[in-house]
Amino acid sequence: MSQQQAINRRIVLGARPQGVPTPLDFRLEETQVPAPGEGQVLLRTLYLSLDPYMRGRMSEAPSYAPPLELDEVMVGGTVGRVVASRNSNFHEGDLVLGNSGWQDYTLSDGRDLTPLGEMARPSYALSVLGMPGFTAWHGLLKIGEPKPGETVVVAAASGAVGAVVGQIAKLKGARVVGIAGGRTKCRYVSEELGFDACIDRRDPQFAVKLTAACPDGIDVYFENVGGEVLDAVLPLLNVGARMPICGFIAHYNERELSPGPNRMPSLLSALLSKRVRAQGFIIHDHYADEFAAFSRDMGGWVTEGKVKLREDIVDGLDKAPDAFIGLLKGENFGKVVVRVAE
Amino acid sequence: MSQQQAINRRIVLGARPQGVPTPLDFRLEETQVPAPGEGQVLLRTLYLSLDPYMRGRMSEAPSYAPPLELDEVMVGGTVGRVVASRNSNFHEGDLVLGNSGWQDYTLSDGRDLTPLGEMARPSYALSVLGMPGFTAWHGLLKIGEPKPGETVVVAAASGAVGAVVGQIAKLKGARVVGIAGGRTKCRYVSEELGFDACIDRRDPQFAVKLTAACPDGIDVYFENVGGEVLDAVLPLLNVGARMPICGFIAHYNERELSPGPNRMPSLLSALLSKRVRAQGFIIHDHYADEFAAFSRDMGGWVTEGKVKLREDIVDGLDKAPDAFIGLLKGENFGKVVVRVAE
């Protein structure tokens, strides 16, 4: 490392967001690059994944993971390069998947690192071949359980999870209807990803068009947005439908209880009258048991060109806050990855 | 039959209720008692079961069963006596479980009848040993799956379903907390049914007391009421909790969308962060596969005195509308059964 590179830039939680985060909720700091101790490696972050779950970690409210403390470095999955090693399992130059968060350099004892070998597209380890892809695979196949000929509806269909859900569902013989924000994204979903249809959730006729696109009702609804999309889906659910729940981005920025009307009775009513199984899941629970099987499946599909994903690459760590705010507003187009270094 | 008995009184849907039904939504009619054709039996209704699901059938909105037409006889499970038979499978005097609805006499071709033999307490065929008991058994054991030492919470705990859910859960080694309306019902639930605790949902400190009664959180919530009870339960759910959903009486009388705040995001958030499995079910789906197993289990428990149920017996068919309205308001104390004839 040259003298100039020996600065570690990091982005910390500056303030807890009230509603939608603003750039002022983040703070860019510069510190010394640390030196690895015995058994440690020093990692240079190459790619940082930005994902909706990070919004939850910025709040004080307890969730499935403890909240970030103020002044703590923002968390995030990363692809990094080993630049110095005092750990016999890793060598300078190794490419690894880790959790360095929003910063240039980190130390690790290696226990949270996964060697990636040489990859044609290392950033895919943060999307199709990583957490979002695994979320799609587990939620769809282990909870949704689509059968050939059934109708699967996926919201946020151009996003990292939704795009993969739909492509797997197609591989399993289902009819797949995506929902995305705007005509450009919808065209991408139906033309490039091969969904049977994609409905623009901003269309004033959204609910009518979704109904028309699902003439046989909905057997699996992969829930990752909530809000008005869910309202439109509920009346279309078939008896015995399954609803894996992995998030609901429409509500992440709400400070208190949402305004009325109260739609909880509608949800309960749909679950009851259609005998729906709704199941929340947190993908971190399933790495030990299922990640290997996922990697085999998905590695094969990616190599064969059966599953692909558009990436929305943002250049520079300092752009991460704006890119993350845009992600929460649906302004991204594809999986958001920050290229921190080459 | 004497001349005087040859009148069939029946109660029909006179008008669709707006909100809580009123006596004016029902109409008592008198018709001739029909004569059985070849293959038919004539049944005298002895006991009529009143159950919350009937409210749904009075509305025009589509649900899991088609709505009643105006002027149609109110539906309902019944215990009847065969008073004339032209069907070789049934004999005068036989006691049968059927679906005569809110009336004195009906014809049947026998296909919807279950012979009851001689029973010490025929009305139990409408509660513990019938549909409500089966609802409790299936929902708790097939969806709730309580393990010894887990905490099971049951709302409407003095009602036909809730009382049985709690007693089965105790037999399976769970800690059981009931919720009921009023101190009298709560005392019955904890002292006579043997629940570990019972919280009065009308208590201003309801949520605080429920929390105190569930020091290890909630593993199974048997959902049959909705409303504020569910709001208090959600924060207490443990990771991996199960929520069988068989109804939500708090919302049956709502005409349109409930007033805010919108609690759907809270429900989704709880399902996600606690990885909850919520599953609606309609007990009619399960008779063919599971009723025999239920009958064996429950018949044994009732005979051994391990499961019991207080009945709220109402004398006279003409009292059915008021009793049903009272049931929807929670004014009953135990399973509501109308004694139509001796």
Image (spheres, coloured by chain):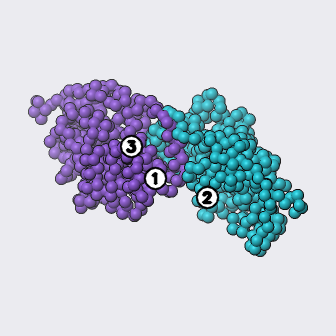
Chain colours: A cyan, B purple
Q: Earlier in the sequence, mark 3 or mark 1?
A: 3
Alpha carbon distance from label 3 to label 1: 17 Å
For image coordinates 65% across by 40% down, the residue present is A20
Crowd tier of the residue under label 1, counting other residues whose Cα lies within 10 Å: few below 14, some 14–19, many 20 or above: many
**Relative to residue A228, is residue B281 drawn left or right?**
left
Residue A29, image x and y in percent?
A: 76, 53
Residue at numbered disc 1: B236
- Front residue (pair A227, B3): A227
Amino acid carrying label 2: it is: His
Residue at numbered disc 3: B225
Residue A69, image x and y in percent?
A: 64, 54
For image coordinates 34% across by 50% down, the residue present is B199
**Relative to residue A261, is residue A33 drawn left or right?**
right
Secondary structure under the numbered disc 3 in the rendered image? loop
Q: Residue B333, which numbered label? A: none
**Quadrant of residue B297 within the rendered picture:** bottom left
Asked if B284 appears above or below A43 in the picture, the reply is above
